[in-house]
Image (cartoon, grey):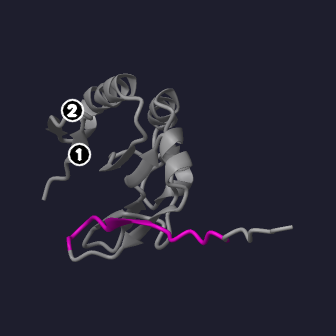
């Protein structure tokens, strides 16, 4: 089943695009456009089909350094910060009949600095899925404990 990215602009129009590896630059250009158009806090959860470092992959050939760097550059240029995750470190896998497997963290949640300031308790969980190759991302807002200050009357 194809994965898509749903983008929501502040005036209500939305666009879908498919993160196909050979079309990654088109997807990255759209992220740049959205970043420039909105000053609102925003979060982007997607199957980006890219890893940012070799430690996000297990098995198979090494991922090309220049492709990882290009993806990191896009995230930096858009001011995105990775929300991290709880759970199994990989969100995608491929298994062959000869017993070889590859696992990668292709799905991730990134957010603007304004998002972090407004929603500091946002957490991402990698959830096992019944789909053949991708795990689900579950995003939740942690309940923050606020300590009420006591009023002191003199």
Q: Which residues are magenta?
A: 131-147
Please tell me whether residue 44 is drawn above or below residue 130 in the rendered image.
above
Pinpoint residue 47: horizontal percent, then vertical percent. Answer: 30, 51
Going from the N terminus, do you reach mark 1 or mark 2 first?
1
Pinpoint residue 1: horizontal percent, then vertical percent. Answer: 12, 59
User: Real-space Cα distance between discs 1 and 2?
Assistant: 18 Å
Please tell me whether residue 88 is drawn above or below residue 14 in the rendered image.
below
Mark in front: 1 vs 2:
2
Location of residue 126 (image quadrant): bottom left
Q: Secondary structure at mark 2?
A: loop
Q: Secondary structure at mark 1?
A: strand
Pinpoint residue 125: horizontal percent, then vertical percent. Answer: 43, 69
Residue at x 42% of width, y 57% of height: 105
Q: Nearer the viewer, residue 62 or 53?
A: 53
| 117 sits left or right of 125 in the view | right
Pinpoint residue 147: horizontal percent, then vertical percent. Answer: 67, 71
| 14 sits left or right of 54 in the view | left
Location of residue 33 (image quadrant): top left
Q: Nearer the viewer, residue 83 or 106?
A: 83
* Residue 33 part of the magenta-drawn span: no
Residue at x 48% of width, y 66% of height: 89
Q: Quadrant of the C terminus?
A: bottom right
Residue that protrudes farthest toward the front in the picture: 154
Does residue 19 appear in the picture of this structure?
Answer: no
Residue at x 40% of width, y 63% of height: 103
* Residue at which label 1 appears: 5
* Residue at which label 2 appears: 11
Please tell me whether residue 89 is drawn above or below residue 27 in the rendered image.
below
Q: Nearer the viewer, residue 3 or 16?
A: 16
Which secondary structure type mostly characterizes the magenta part of the structure? loop
């Amino acid at each position: 089943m194809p994965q898509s990215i749903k983008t929501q602009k502040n005036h209500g129009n939305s666009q879908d695009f498919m993160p196909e590896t050979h079309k990654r630059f088109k997807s990255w250009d759209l992220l740049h456009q959205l970043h420039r158009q909105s000053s609102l806090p925003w979060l982007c959860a997607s199957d980006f089909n890219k890893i940012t470092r070799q430690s996000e992959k297990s098995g198979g050939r090494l991922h090309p350094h220049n492709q990882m760097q290009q993806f990191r550059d896009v995230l930096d240029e858009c001011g995105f910060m990775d929300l991290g995750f709880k759970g199994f470190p990989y969100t995608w896998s491929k298994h062959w009949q000869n017993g070889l497997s590859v696992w990668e963290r292709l799905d991730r949640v990134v957010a603007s600095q304004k998002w972090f300031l407004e929603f500091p308790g946002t957490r991402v969980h990698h959830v096992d899925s019944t789909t053949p190759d991708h795990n689900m991302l579950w995003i939740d807002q942690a309940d923050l404990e606020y300590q009420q200050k006591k009023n002191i009357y003199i």
